[in-house]
Image: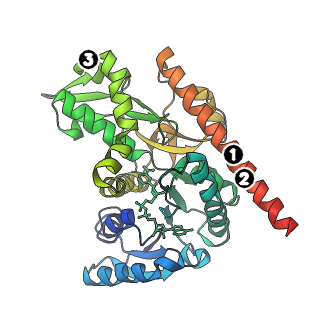
Amino acid sequence: KVEPLRVCVTGAAGQIAYSLIINIANGTVFGPEQPVILQLLDIAPALEAMKGVEMELYDCALPLLAGIVLTTDPLEAFRDVDYAILLGAMPRRAGMLRKDLLKANVGIFQVQGAAIDAVAKKTVKVVVVGNPANTNALVCSHYAPSIPKANFSALTRLDENRAKSMVAVRAGVAVDQVKNVIIWGNHSNTQYPDVAHAHITRDGARVAVEEAIKDEAYLHGEFIKAVALRGAAIIAARKLSSAMSAAKAVVDHVRDWHFGTRSGEFVSMAVVTDAHAAAAYGIPEDLCFSLPLSIKEDGHYEVVAGLPVSDFARGKLDATVAELEEEKAEAFAHIEYLAAVKKAE
Ligand code: NAI
């Protein structure tokens, strides 16, 4: 008998969760033999909506769904979990600056990090999706000191999938024939979608993407912009942010982290940089930075080192490093400010 995995999803009443949860509970993420217990967290005003999601989960009649916990208490939501998928965050409202969003969200990820530290399995793997995802993940990891830093990640797989799909269309191949596109840095406009190490397979032959799409002006210009601004284009069209594709990206991210990547193939995840990552690409330590990773079957990953970095790429990496350092400084300054206010009260 296979023991169920406990999977926490926060923001469980929200729109990404609505597309994601079914894929966790029906075997798409963890395979057809693996039962799961879903531990769903949202805030009190969303409890009723979350109950509706629970009713629908029962109505899906899912043989792998071994239990459901619905709660508004992080200490209950994260208890004994193997995976924590953090979608829940304060949404960005019209006129709100990225800085304001950051301030609104650091408190949430501080509290949830501490709760994960207190009650989750020490082997828990954490995926932060709520924006600003990289810095939220970094904050979360800082407040969960008993969990290895390597177990915290932020989602950049949606950016990777967007980039792969654009390459596939341009090169005239199916999307699964595009491999090793990298997203570097922040899940924001400074991200660097990089095809310099990517290839496609056409008629059985491997072709570098830069050979298949012989258009440097496009690959260094319009392509990068289109990937980075895709989220905004979807909001403009749907009047809602991407949810179906975000959920699919979470599925890909978690499945690859659980089962590993194929030999010679890598995927991008934003992870907390250590000395090895820093040395490989000249990135400061202790930033949550999207990098190419190869993941082993046991879930341990390695940063793919030794890829040559062109002058163009260096400029892009430095820009996204600068933004993440600024976000980190702002986040921790705001946490200190909140602590000082609390102390004064
Ligand atoms: P949504 O607004 O539909 O749902 C968010 C849910 O989180 C709501 O039900 C809300 O009540 C809940 N929530 C708020 N504060 C919470 C807290 N402290 N604890 C638990 N739950 C809480 O948003 P949606 O569309 O599901 O997106 C979720 C997040 O994902 C947003 O921050 C969005 O910006 C981000 N996102 C990130 C992407 C990425 O690639 N990294 C892609 C798309 C969205």
Disc 2 crowd rating (10 Å Cα; few below 14, some 14-19, many 20+) is: some
**Spot occupied by residue 171 in the image (x, y as percentages of width and height):** 19, 27
User: Disc 3 vs disc 1: which is toward the camera?
Assistant: 1
* Residue under label 2: 334
**Tags 2 and 3 touching, CB below 8 Å:** no
Q: Residue at x 59, y 35 (%)?
A: 323
Q: Is residue 29 left or right of residue 192?
A: left
Q: Residue 330's x, y, as percent?
A: 69, 45
Type of the residue with mark 2:
His
Measure the alpha-carbon separation of dots 3 and 1: 42 Å
* Marks 1,2: beta carbons within 8 A: yes
User: Does dot 1 land on a helix, a strand or a loop?
Assistant: helix
Q: Alpha-carbon distance for marks 2 and 3?
A: 47 Å
Q: Find disc 3 in the rendering and name its residue.
A: 211
Ligand 1 within 8 A of label 3's CB?
no
Tag of residue 330:
1
Q: How is the image coloured?
A: rainbow
Spatial separation of the CA atoms under disc 1 and disc 2: 6 Å
- What's the amino acid at mark 1? Glu
Residue 226 or 300: which is nearer the viewer?
226
Q: Which type of secondary structure does the marked residue at label 3 adopt?
A: helix
Number of dots carrying numbers:
3
Residue labelled 2 has its Cβ within 8 Å of some atom of ligand 1: no
Q: Is residue 239 shown to the viewer in this render?
A: yes
Q: Position of residue 139 (x, y in %)?
A: 65, 53
As helix, strand or loop, the secondary structure at mark 2 comes to helix
Image mark for residue 37: none
User: Which of pointers 2 and 3 indicates the residue nearer the eye?
Assistant: 2
Near mark 3 (Cα within 10 A), the count class, few <14, some 14-19 or many ≥20, is few
